[in-house]
Image: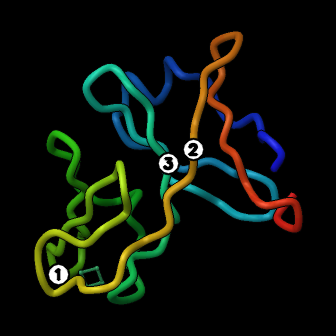
Amino acid sequence: MPWIKTIEAATVESEEIAAAQAGKDWVVLYAADGGFYASAVLCSHGQASLADGYLEDFLIECPLHQGTFDIRTGEPVDPPCTEPVRVYPTKVEDGFIYVEVEENET
Ligand code: FES
């Protein structure tokens, strides 16, 4: 699966949450506990962007109904979320965050 270059790690570090294009799709990048994580933009419960959410430790809280997901696994943690959100592997090279996507998503 291809790795897609997104945005500078320093930007995500300073903002904690940032949306970025990764191939055909947009993802949300998170900085937490010295690492970087990536998820789908849309909450699995409704039409809300997790990029507008609130990050605490490894939990992203959706801005619409305050459900939460673990950014490491995408699993729902607090209701009303019951379905996971997709997460993506990340790595940092030359100061940029790369996200691994499916071949057909590039
Ligand atoms: S839309 Fe995200 S918790 Fe409802």
Q: Where on the image, by quarter, is ligand 1?
A: bottom left
Residue type at tag 1: His
Q: CA distance from mark 1 to mark 2?
A: 27 Å
- Foreground mark, 3 or 2? 2
Q: CA distance from mark 1 to mark 3?
A: 21 Å
Residue type at tag 3: Ala
Label 2's element? loop
Q: Quadrant of residue 85?
A: bottom left
- Foreground mark, 1 or 3? 3
- Relative to 81, is 106 on the left or the right? right
Q: Are marks 3 and 2 in contact (CB under 8 Å)?
A: yes
Q: Between disc 1 and disc 2, whose residue precedes? A: 1
49 or 27, which is in the foreground?
Answer: 27
Q: Are marks 1 and 2 in contact (CB under 8 Å)?
A: no
Give the residue pinned by disc 1: 65
Give the residue pinned by disc 2: 89
